[in-house]
Image (spheres, helix red, strand yellow):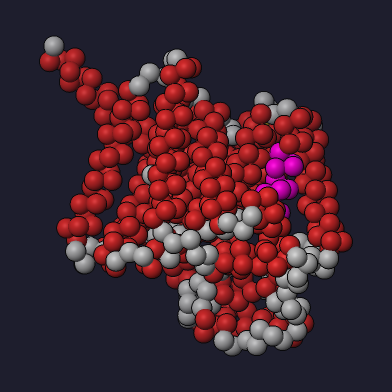
Amino acid sequence: MINKFQKIISYIILVCVALFTSVVFIQMLINLARNYMPFEPGRYVLVLCLGLVFVLISGFILYKLKDDNKTMNLIILLALLAIFAVVAILWINFVPNTQLSDFGNFWNRAPDALKGGKIYAFDNDYFAKWAYQTGFLVYVMTVVKIFGYHVAAIQYLNVVYQVLILLLTYKLVIKIFDNIKMARLSVLLLMINLDWFALNTQADNQYIGSLLFLTTFYLILKDKYWSYALAGLALAVGCIVRPIGPVIIAGIVVFAIFYMWLNNNKFNWNAIWKVLIVLAIYFVVFGGAGLLIKSSGLNQYGLSNRDSEWKFVTGLDYTSKGVYDQNMVNKFDLRESRDKMSKKEHKVIHQNIKTINENHGWVNLFWHKLSLLWAERSTGIDFTGVEVNHSAKTVDIVRYAGYVGSILIIIFSWIGSLRILKIDYNKGIFLLLLPLMAFVIVQLLIEVQGRYRIEFIPVLAVLAGTGLYTIINWISTKWSGRHGRSV
């Protein structure tokens, strides 16, 4: 009875993922038709076709290389990682070193913070209302302390994290599908996605956060008491530097209930202790870090979020479709106290909801937000300042080339999400999919930016590797069949 219930839950989750990838696939086609094909369609189609052909040829080669030799497998993996590292470093030298937006806020404040300077001037300042960002600021301060005030240190560390993310993606696919060729293809699709790796030039917390969250998943799947302890530590440090912990924790808890507690047609009571180990270490380490930041005098608010309303102020803004809007910001006096600001934010949120209801706009709002976050360009390239040292034509080509990487993952993750309904896999796939779907749902209500998907692109790459493997396996089978008949 338990197994039947678990199968039903699994099927529902997989169907939801398939619906999600199908909607994103449709939205991607609409975006291409509206924003690209009416303008120089020949060039855009050519670049997309070249990207598709490159992936199919490269994927076919990786598929054909034998996977029964450990040394050969290691060489192939190291070659892929080395190629990516070279390209990632070349990208760093292709764009300016200027730190923009929030990234500049971290980088520019670090030297003064190291000297004991205040990181906020009033209780509604950036690091006062979003004190949780202090965790990553401490990381940037540590890098500056060790390597000096050289942005290259941050950039090259980001490349290291990206390489390790590729490695973990490879390991997770093998853990879940026991398929080395599929793991190679997942790495291939992720490593060529410029939309994903473009922000390595910035003091961005998404790569180190993504690495730590993937490490958490991998350690949980190891299913050892020591690995659960390390998973709790990785989760805590990940949330300290990149505060999206609630969706990760929600995914882990739901996974624990349906796939650890319910196991082999019986209740596995030991699973409760394993999850409690993860959560206990997380809360101790995260809470301890907040207390240390308070006691150090760096931020009297620790790692708290004192302005959780703001994400809903922008996220439920029907006019801007849930993205950051300066017109909305201009409605507030940002130098007012947090108490006064909070009351005004609540009023705006209620007004936003009223506007949406009057326009019957919930579906329309959710549709646009889903498209902005998952189906269009990640806008990561926009945050590099590439337009400063390159022509408009070059920038357009680079941005579209980055988008092609996302398009390929969208296409193959859609195929993979359909294929996974019928193939064998380890239950660990749900440890990746549940946080992804939790993030998708949360982002329907709060502010969205295309770059926010960066942490979850590796999860989509796992699905995409499944889809690409399915296509190449089909091509290989057909080719072998025809070749066999012709002999």
Question: Is residue 373 shown to the viewer in this render?
Answer: no
Instruction: Please identify the residue farthest to the front as the structure is shown.
Output: 148
Instruction: Please identify the residue farthest to the top as the structure is shown.
Output: 487
Q: Nearer the viewer, residue 357 or 125?
A: 125
* Residue 196 image position (x, y, % from top left): 45, 51
* Residue 145 image position (x, y, % from top left): 69, 54
Residue depicted at x 67% and y 73%: 126
In terms of secondary structure, what is the magenta stretch mainly? helix
Residue depicted at x 61% and y 63%: 107
Q: Which residues are magenta?
A: 231-240
* Residue 72 image position (x, y, % from top left): 43, 19
Q: Nearer the viewer, residue 348 or 199?
A: 199
Count of marks overlaid on the render: 0
Quarter of the image where the C terminus is located: top left
Location of residue 272 (image quadrant): top right
Residue depicted at x 47% and y 73%: 321
> Is residue 223 positioned above or below 159 on the image?
above
Residue depicted at x 32% and y 23%: 64
Quarter of the image where the N terminus is located: top right
> Is residue 325 positioned above or below 283 on the image?
below
Instruction: Please identify the residue farthest to the right as the structure is shown.
Output: 295
Location of residue 347 (image quadrant): bottom right
* Residue 320 image position (x, y, % from top left): 48, 77
